[in-house]
């Protein structure tokens, strides 16, 4: 980071003068402090540590809960770990440990789907990163080995949904890019080269087959599990097979940037940038995507704040990886814009309910979780705030050191 980037961050905050829907005097620290207090209050009202927050239905104020095998189980302990990291509050640490512990069973069960990465890395991964607890490391390594059992050598990718094999053959969804971080981490921490090779191959197969010529993404790719041939691109949660599902696009932005960080393969970063630019080109004026960019009901279609939060994390990742100062400026500025909008009265829940963010959409085609708070939106919002705070601190420290 340099003086130029510090100036950019300061200007970006100052240039966006508050409107009636924005948080005055925005800062990552201020929003983190508010979110930590809200998270702690929610934690204090929870007794069972083996059920996990999932969503808040319309016109309700409290989180609905799910069991440990739900794909979202890792996000609530992940929120707690980010809250602890931001506050050093021991109550939050104890809560994070308590809600992380039950997820251990996922690491040792036979793999049922690709979501082991979301479930274990968001919980145990953050816990190990923050505490260095060796017991967490062992769980992570076991989880990576379990996830790797879904890899098909003939296709070169991880099977996403075994239960949908009859419908899609060997299916690989764009969400799965995010689960590769568990494999890359494990490969560097005693898990072996094969985990790295699996993750790299999966990213390559996804890049080759799920990225369309216009730099939008298929949600799902179907492959012949015997020959590895790509059969067809589908959607599962988007409007149509050829439409641009918002959250899927942001999984790709973040996932390919992470894959570049772990491998140094420039084609992954190039792909992430192309996906990001296409996303930015198609965003509505208010900066928050509709659940699918091609829903014919736009502008009456619901928004997806979770996609905006993931996009913010992904673009901060890109900004940290590119060498060109103009690109750093571009993607840092876009991420800050998304975080500011999510921190406004329109999207930040405040006293409305227990969640941090409003207006996320889970599975519109199944009429599930539409325009309500969803836990993974809170997780990536917290991650974005933590990343931005660290960026501000690092840039300010470097600028101060250069003055001396």
Image: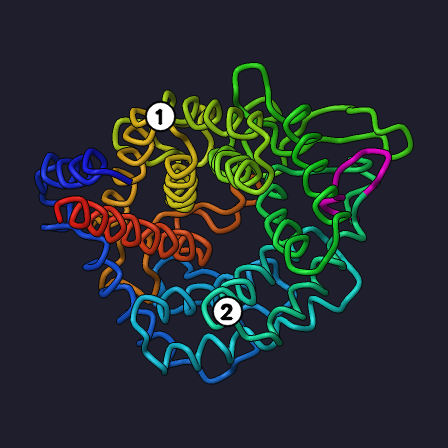
178 or 200, nearer to the observer: 200
The residue tagged 1 is 324
Location of residue 349 in the rendering, given as x and y in whole percent from the top left corner: 27, 57
Colour mapping used in the image: rainbow
Left/right of residue 55 with respect to residue 19 in the rendered view: right
State the SS at label 1: loop
Magenta-colored stretch includes residue 96: no
20 or 368, nearer to the observer: 20
- Which residues fall within the magenta stretch? 152-162
Location of residue 253 in the rendering, given as x and y in whole percent from the top left corner: 49, 34
The residue tagged 2 is 127
Would you say residue 303 is visible in this rendering?
no
Location of residue 222 in the rendering, given as x and y in whole percent from the top left corner: 75, 31
Q: Is residue 302 above or below residue 242?
A: below
Which dot marks residue 191?
A: none
Q: Quadrant of residue 311?
A: top left
Left/right of residue 229 with respect to residue 367 in the rendered view: right
Q: Of the two numbered discs 2 and 1 on the same chain, state the one appearing first in sequence.
A: 2
Q: Is residue 282 above or below residue 132?
A: above
Residue at the extreme bottom of the image, as rendered: 47
């Amino acid at each position: 980071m340099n003086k130029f980037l510090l100036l950019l961050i300061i200007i970006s905050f100052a240039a966006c003068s508050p409107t009636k829907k924005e948080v005055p005097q925005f800062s990552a620290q201020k929003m983190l402090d508010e979110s930590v207090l809200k998270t702690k209050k929610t934690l204090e009202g929870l007794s069972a540590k083996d059920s996990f927050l999932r969503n808040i239905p319309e016109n309700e104020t409290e989180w609905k809960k799910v069991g440990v095998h739900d794909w979202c189980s890792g996000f609530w302990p992940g929120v707690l770990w980010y809250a602890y990291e931001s506050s050093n509050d021991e109550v939050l640490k104890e809560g994070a440990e308590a809600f992380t512990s039950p997820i251990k069973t996922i690491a040792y069960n036979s793999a049922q789907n690709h979501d082991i990465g979301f479930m274990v890395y968001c919980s145990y991964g953050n816990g190990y990163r923050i505490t260095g607890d060796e017991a967490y490391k062992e769980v992570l390594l076991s989880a990576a080995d379990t996830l790797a059992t879904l890899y098909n050598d003939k296709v070169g990718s991880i099977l996403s949904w075994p239960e949908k094999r009859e419908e899609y053959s060997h299916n690989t969804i764009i969400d799965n890019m995010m689960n590769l971080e568990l494999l890359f981490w494990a490969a560097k921490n005693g898990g072996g080269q094969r985990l790295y090779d699996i993750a790299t191959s999966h990213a390559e197969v996804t890049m080759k087959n799920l990225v369309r010529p216009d730099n939008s993404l298929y949600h799902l790719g179907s492959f012949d599990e015997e020959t590895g041939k790509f059969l067809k691109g589908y959607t599962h949660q988007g409007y149509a097979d050829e439409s641009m599902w918002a959250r899927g696009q942001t999984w790709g932005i973040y996932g390919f940037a992470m894959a570049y960080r772990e491998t140094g393969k420039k084609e992954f970063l190039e792909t992430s940038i192309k996906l990001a630019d296409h996303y930015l080109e198609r965003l509505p004026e208010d900066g928050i995507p509709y659940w699918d960019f091609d829903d014919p009901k736009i502008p009456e279609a619901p928004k997806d704040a979770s996609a905006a939060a993931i996009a913010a994390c992904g673009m901060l990742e890109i900004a940290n990886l590119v060498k060109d100062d103009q690109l750093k400026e571009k993607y840092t500025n876009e991420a800050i814009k998304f975080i500011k909008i999510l921190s406004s009265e329109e999207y930040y829940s405040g006293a409305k309910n227990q969640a941090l963010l409003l207006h996320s959409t889970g599975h519109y085609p199944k009429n599930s979780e539409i325009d309500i708070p969803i836990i993974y939106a809170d997780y990536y919002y917290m991650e974005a705030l933590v990343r931005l705070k660290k960026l501000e601190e690092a840039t300010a420290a470097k600028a101060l050191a250069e003055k001396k």
